[in-house]
Image (cartoon, coloured by chain):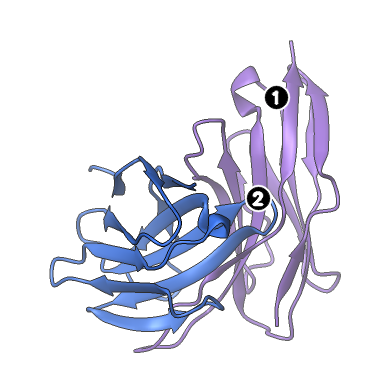
Chain colours: A purple, B blue
Amino acid sequence: AQTVTQSQPEMSVQEAETVTLSCTYDTSESDYYLFWYKQPPSRQMILVIRQEAYKQQNATENRFSVNFQKAAKSFSLKISDSQLGDAAMYFCAYRSVGNYGGSQGNLIFGKGTKLSVKP
Amino acid sequence: KAGVTQTPRYLIKTRGQQVTLSCSPISGHRSVSWYQQTPGQGLQFLFEYFSETQRNKGNFPGRFSGRQFSNSRSEMNVSTLELGDSALYLCASSFRARGETQYFGPGTRLLVL
């Protein structure tokens, strides 16, 4: 079974600084997807970024980028120029490719990292 | 395009009662998944529906059930509520293709007394 581990329960960053959240996962599959979701106090789960395992290039979305190390099964999230609105719980998630006509594959989440942003 | 909607947003029930939660996916999305979020267990997968058929199920007792309608709207039902069922229930939808991202609704917060 696949597992996702986020070893940092809480992290703090100064506004405008850069912070990196860590995530490791375990799987025997070669093709899969990885995601970072953000959950602010409103509890709405918001997609931050996604990475396809078959792509070597690291995904980037504005101030958010990932460092995907497939061999090491590591998937860290870097937030540049941190803003007060970035304060939230961040969840790393894994999803299998799924089967045509069958399951699409459910998300497997880590326990989350609570990010605080200091003004 | 409107996002995923869930009703009700908040619910208080007592032990032994049953509850039905509703989820309307993003227009055009045909796959709906449900997750339970608790402080102790984190986010856990409940079920996945596509074309009114359950495609995948998590490790939850039979008291948890769901269904999907022809318009892709989904409901989940929990019978004989227990205190441990208190949680945030999240619904997520996707278009239904390999690799499609799941987009989440705001959740239904259920409190069982």
Camera-nearest residue between B67 and B48: B67
Q: Which quarter of the picture shows residue A29?
A: bottom right
Q: Is residue B12 above or below residue A17?
A: below
Other residues around mark 2 within 10 Å, as few (<14) / some (14–19) / many (≥20): many
Inspect the image, locate mark 2, and give the three-letter code of the amino acid beneath it: Phe
Q: Confirm whether residue B95 shows in the render.
A: no
Q: Confirm whether residue A116 shows in the render.
A: yes
Total tally of numbered discs in the picture: 2
Residue A83 percent location from the top left of the image:
65, 20
Q: Is residue B95 above or below residue B3?
A: below
Image check: B45 left or right of A86?
left
Camera-nearest residue between B29 and B33: B33
Q: Which mark is residue A82?
A: 1
Quickly name the residue at label 2. A91
Camera-nearest residue between B68 and A105: B68
Other residues around mark 1 within 10 Å, as few (<14) / some (14–19) / many (≥20): many
Cβ–Cβ under 8 Å for marks 1 and 2: no
- Residue under the image location 53 percent in, 68 percent down: B45
Residue A68 percent location from the top left of the image:
75, 60
Toward the left, the furthest residue is B70
Pointer 1 chain: A
Give the CA distance from mark 1 to mark 2: 17 Å
Pointer 2 chain: A
Please name which of the two marks, 1 or 2, marks the residue nearer to the observer: 2
Image check: A92 left or right of A71?
left
Q: Which quarter of the picture shows residue B2?
A: top left
- Residue under the image location 20 percent in, 61 percent down: B28
